[in-house]
Amino acid sequence: MEIYKDLKSPVNQQFEKLLNSQLSKNKIEEGKIIEGKITKITEKFVFIFIPGLKSEPIVDINELKIIGLKDRLSVGESVPVLLEKIEDKNGEVIVSAIKAQKIKGWYELEKAYESNSSIIGKITSKCKGGVIVEHKDTGSLMFCPGSQISDKPLKNIDHLIGVEQKFAIIKLDKIRGNACVSRRQIVSSNKREDKAKIIEKFNVGDVIKDAVVKGYSSFGCFFEVNNEIDVLVHLQEISYSRVNHPDEIFNVGEKHDLKVISIDKEKLQIGCSIKQLSPDPFEHISNYEIGKKYKVKVDKITDYGCFCSLEPGLSTLLHSSEMSWTKRNIIPKKLFKIGDMIDCVITEIDKDKRRIAISHKLTIENPYETLADKYPAGSEISGVVSSSNDYALYVKLDGFEIEGFLHANDLSYTGNPDNELKNYKKGDKLKVKVLEIKKEDQKVRVGLKQIGVDPFDWFKNKQINDIITVKVLSTDNKGIFVKPEGCDLEFLIKKSNIAVNASDARPSRFVGGERIDAAISEINIEKRKVNLSIKLLEELQNKEAVTKFSSPLSGKNLPFSSLSEKLSDKKNNDKDKE
C-alpha cells in the first residue's frame, strides 16, 4: 500500500483515475434496488452478476416465480433486486427480488396518491372488514374496506372478484407500508359526471310528472325521477297545511307531480315542491266555519289518526281521540280506509299556524248525554262485567256502549275490597247504582254496595256517650275486634280504650264470644267513622256510681278496680265536712 501514497507519480495518478471512474459507474449501497444479470440457472437457484460486488448473489428460483418473472428466467436477462447486505457473517451477498418489487410498487403508489390519480387493480380475495386488491403493474397488495366497495349496499361481490378495474388511493401508511384504496370513489365520480348531464335537462319552473316516492326523512321526502335522478321535496314544500313528518302524507311507491323550484349545479341537487302546483287553500279559509259539519276525504291512515282533506291541498288531522265517544285505544284502520268520505265537524281554525282541527264523534250522538238524561246519578242500571284490574271492575251498561268504573271500595260495605274483587269475573251480570257521570271527560262511576242497605245507618240515631252491647270476635296486640248486636259492621277497640287502669287494659283478658258494653267515643255519619271505648264506659259508670254512692253495674263482668278507691275518698271527704 505504500506505493499509492505518492500521488504525484504519473502511474499512481492514472491508477487513481481508473479506480474512481470504475466506482462512479457502480455505486454499491445497501438498501437500494440494483439491476443484475442472470449468469447461471439451476433447479433451485439463480446466480446474478452485479458489477462492483466481490461475489455473485444467489436468488431462490421460487421467489422469482412468485413475483411473475418466470418467463424472464434465462441467462443474460436483467432482474431488479434489493441489496440487503453487501457481506453477511458468512461473507455472502444478500439480495431479494420480492422486496425490490414491493418497494418499486410502493413508489408507484406514492406517485399516484400525490397526483390524485387512479390505479388499475383487481380484487383477489375477501377478508375481515373488506377485500384485498392487487395492483396490476407491481403486484402490490392493498386493502379496500367494505364500505368503499360500492356507493350502495351489495349483498354479493363475487362478480367483482378477479376483474381489473379502477381504484382510488385514499390512505398510505409509509411506516407500516400499508395502502388503503376505494372503488366507491371511482363509481361515485362516474355517476357525478352522469348526474351533471342529467341536471342540465331541468330548469326552474318545470313540472315533473309521476315522480315516485323513494323514501323520507325528518326534513323532507325523496322522489325518483325517470329512474335516473333523485330529487328532494322539503317538509315545508309538501303541503300548505302543517306536516310533522312526510310519512303522514306519502307512502313509498306513490306517484306525484312535482314543480322544480331550485337547481344547485355545484352540489348537483334539485329542489322541488308539491304545494306550489296548486293555489294556497288558506286564502279562502273563510269559506269554512267552526262548529259546522263537512265531508272530508281520508288520504292517509296512521296509528294515531287519519289525515283528511277538506279540499285538494287543504289537509287536516282527525285524531283517534276524536273518532268515537266510547271506544278506547282506537285502531283507525279498523274504522276507516283510504278514500272514505266521512262527516266531520271543524273544531278549530288557526290561520297563523295554518292548522285545522276536526272531529268525527261530534257528528254522532253523545251517549254520555243520553245516559245522563235517562239514568242520572242515583239511578239503578244493569250491566255485565267486561274487564277488571287490581283495584276495580269495568261494567258495560245495558243499552249503551259505555263502561262504568266500579271501584273495589264500592263493592261491599263490610268485606275486604281485595277479597271482594276476587268474587267477580268477566261476564257476571250486576245491578249497580250510577254514582257520577262526567260528560266532558267521558267517564261514569258506578257502585254495587249502594244498591243494598247501608249498615252504617244503624248509627244514625246514636250519639257520643251512648252505650251499646257488642260481641267480642277476636283479639290481637292492638286491641279487640267487636261487632255491635244488630249491626253488620266490625270495629276495633284499641288497647288504650279497654280500661282506665293500665293493668286492666289487656286484650288477653278476652277470649272471644263475650258480650260486653262499650260507649261511643266518636261518631261522624258523613265520614262514616265510629270509635268505641270500654274505658269511656267505665269513666261514665264510675262518675254515676260516685254521685249516687252506689255501684249499679248492671251485671257486667268488668272489674273496675278504681271504683272502690273513689268511693272511699268520697266518704272520707263527707266525714271531714261533718
Image (tube, rainbow, N blue to C red):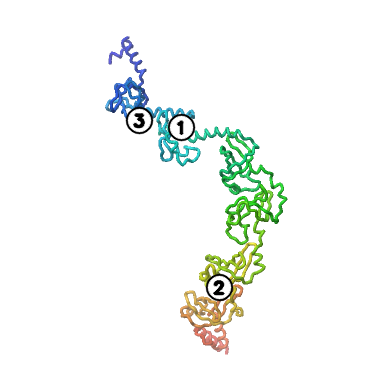
Q: Is tag 3's residue or tag 2's residue first in the polypeptide sequence?
A: 3
Residue 546, label in figure: none
Name the front one of labels 2 and 1: 1
The image quadrant that residue 82 belongs to is top left
Residue 66, label in figure: 3
Q: Is tag 2's residue or tag 1's residue first in the polypeptide sequence?
A: 1
Pointer 3 local density, CA inside 10 Å: few below 14, some 14–19, many at least 20 = few
Residue sitting at 59 percent across and 34 percent down?
A: 199
In the image, taking residue 175 as reference, residue 51 lies left or right, namely: left
* Mark 3 residue type: Ile
From the image, which quarter does the C terminus lie in?
bottom right
* Mark 2 residue type: Ser
Residue annotated with mark 1: 165
Residue sitting at 58 percent across and 60 percent down?
A: 328
Provide the secondary structure element on which disc 2 rests: loop
Pointer 1 local density, CA inside 10 Å: few below 14, some 14–19, many at least 20 = some
